[in-house]
Image (cartoon, rainbow, N blue to C red):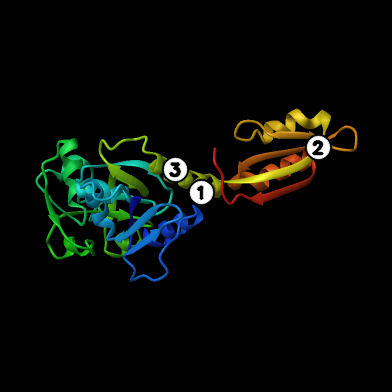
Amino acid sequence: MLRIAVPNKGSLSGPAAAMLHEAGYQQRRESKELRVVDPVNEVEFFYLRPRDIAIYVSSGRLDIGVTGRDLLIDSGADAEEILPLGFARSTFRFAARPGAVKSLADLSGTTVATSYEGIVDKYLAEQGVDASVVHLDGAVETAIELGVAEVIADVVETGTSLRNAGLEVFGDPIMKSEAVVVRRTGAPADEPKVQQFLRRLQGVLVARTYVMMDYDCRVEQLEKAVALTPGLESPTVSPLHNEGWVAVRAMVPSADAQKIMDDLYDLGARAILTTAIHACRL
């Protein structure tokens, strides 16, 4: 039975559970449940603190886990990312009082406050910057005001919290994070149950990104229409009862669907429909 770690709370928990449900896996019904067995799919889910998941996976006690890329790197665990999941995206950056620090080189000799000591230590070492790092759990924006540090390193979304604290970001992003599937470094890559799990999640990702588009068009406009809807490999084209007309079916990016429909209509296509994709295998 495949043993999988899943976030038990926080911004990763809800989207992870939703994706796993879309992939056909049984999920917990109450937040207090710490373990769920899905006998049909031969999977056992363990609901753990997101920060601990990479450590459990690296120990070999669990086969794979869902956590954040930032948490994986920060943990220093002997685990690796095998599939990005596209949710819980964030950017990790340095911030300081306006004008106090202009470049990464200015960090030498300063103290940096962060909740992600592992990430910052690793990044500074890679950049050859000699700065002290102090670990704080949450609300690192106040570290500068209280004299604990001259610089902070934290997740930045809109930047509102930083501006409210009188701070501004500087330099390039330290890293970009999102939810990822992780496994123990060096674990067999071809384990059938793991591959099946990854295929299911990849199917969900594709289903969320694409819609199925159907339309009718004149044969003489087919090449131009197909150029707008090439599909993943090629579209399905079928003759209609009315001579000179064909029906076309293809997957198109959902973000572009409305524009493609407009362009097809201008070409003379009619009966243009889009339908959601709930699951797929590519």
Task: Classify 187 as above or below 271.
Answer: above
Could you say where residue 76 lies in the image, as x and y percent from the top left? 19, 46
**Is mark 3 in CB contact (under 8 Å) with mark 2?**
no
Please give the residue where the numbered disc 2 appears in the rendered image: 217
Note whether residue 87 is visible. Answer: yes
The quadrant of the picture occupied by the C terminus is top right
| Mark 2 or 1: the one toward you | 1
**Mark 1: secondary structure:** helix
> Residue, x 30% and y 54% (percent of image)?
155
Using the image, tell me which numbered label, if any, was put on residue 111: none
- Graded by Cα atoms within 10 Å as few (under 14), some (14 to 19) or many (20 or more), the crowding at tag 2 reads many
At label 1, which amino acid type do we have?
Val
Please give the residue where the numbered disc 3 appears in the rendered image: 196
User: Which quarter of the figure has residue 80?
Assistant: top left
At label 2, which amino acid type do we have?
Cys
Q: Between marks 2 and 1, how big is the CA–CA gap?
A: 30 Å
**Is mark 2 in CB contact (under 8 Å) with mark 1?**
no
Q: Earlier in the sequence, mark 3 or mark 2?
A: 3
User: Which quarter of the figure has residue 123?
Assistant: top left
Q: Earlier in the sequence, mark 2 or mark 1?
A: 1
- Graded by Cα atoms within 10 Å as few (under 14), some (14 to 19) or many (20 or more), the crowding at tag 1 reads many
| Mark 1 or 3: the one toward you | 3
- Asked whether, in this view, residue 235 is left or right of residue 98, the answer is right
Task: Classify 139 as above or below 239.
Answer: below
- Asked whether, in this view, residue 232 is left or right of residue 270, the answer is left
Please give the residue where the numbered disc 1 appears in the rendered image: 204
Q: How many labels sit on residues?
A: 3
- Graded by Cα atoms within 10 Å as few (under 14), some (14 to 19) or many (20 or more), the crowding at tag 3 reads few
**Mark 3: secondary structure:** helix
**Mark 2: secondary structure:** strand
